[in-house]
Image: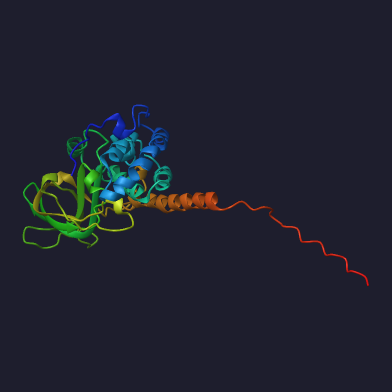
Amino acid sequence: MRVTAIDQTDEQTGGLDHLREPTTSDAILENVTAILPIAEREAKPSNAQGFMTDAMTEACRAAGVFRVGFPRDRGGPEMSISDQTRMVEMVAGIDASLAWNVTVLAATGFYAGRLPDRAFAELYPTLDLATCGSFHPKGVARRVDGGFRVTGDWNFGSGIRSSDHVVAGAEVVDEQGEPVLKPDGSQLTLGVWLPRDEVRLRDDWHTIGLRGSGSQGYGVADAFVPADHTFDRFFAGNADASPLVKHPDLPFYSMGGISIGIAQRDRHRGDRARPPLRHPCPRRARARPARRG
């Protein structure tokens, strides 16, 4: 599991110095277009090893992929859902596994944007730190002084080997093990930032499709999580909030770009493979006149 950005040679990354500063949606989309040759090159080795290569991870980082979901009041580009979908679609035109990683790790800002100021500054000194996570099945977060003791095993930790932070979903119980309820009567479910050195990975991702997404399971046992390293996973929607934090399910809409990108890729392949018609409307053979006598 990675911890921070690593140094990459020009040969590994294909040269990233030409990319624009990823401060706007237009710049990031242009950068993603520019790294598509790297995606083309890294798709096969990513699928062979079962997770995204370091070279592709660093290309995504440099392009600004991991910062697209950060709201403007956190210094982010606050990229619209439609532009995020377009970004995913472009990568899916190269490889679906890489596009799946892009979708998941691009959701970093959706979660990080809900942290209080001190925790945000601590966990995200730069907006280019990728965050992965899964919220099912839910773990348990037991209240203790200063935070929670979290235990759980989660499936489908897509991008976990390429991420800098790992979040997970956990239902909160009090010191006696009783469920902590919200005003609407539902049990409080938190998104929690797990301590990286206590996360254990499961060797359970051996698939044919989306092999390179690295969607293996992970877990922790009695890991301490500070109270301010959490957020209400199923917060109530707020129409007055900034665009990307209006609703808890917004991180997942851009996944539609994966199907679109795959379909467009296959259509183009079909167009190239189809032999040209000699004539769209072949003429009928002229009827020969009947022979006399």
Q: Quadrant of the C terminus?
A: bottom right
Left or right side of 278 for 123: left
Q: What residue is drawn where x is 61% and y is 51%?
A: 276
Q: Position of residue 70 (x, y in %)?
A: 31, 39
Could you say where residue 242 lies in the image, as x and y percent from the top left?
A: 35, 42
Residue extending farthest to the right is 293
Q: Nearer the viewer, residue 160 or 84?
A: 160
- How is this picture coloured? rainbow
Among the 4 quarters of the image, the one containing residue 90: top left
Seen from the viewer's position, the closer of residues 145 and 209 is: 209
Looking at the picture, how far across and down is residue 4, in whole percent? 20, 36
Residue at the limit of the structure toward the bottom, as seen here: 293
271 displayed left or right of 44: right
Residue drawn where x is 71% and y is 57% of the image: 281
- Split into 4 quadrants, where in the image is the N terminus? top left
Residue 260 x, y percent position in the rendering: 45, 51
Asked whether the viewer can see residue 193, the reply is yes
Between 19 and 24, the residue placed more toward the observer is: 19
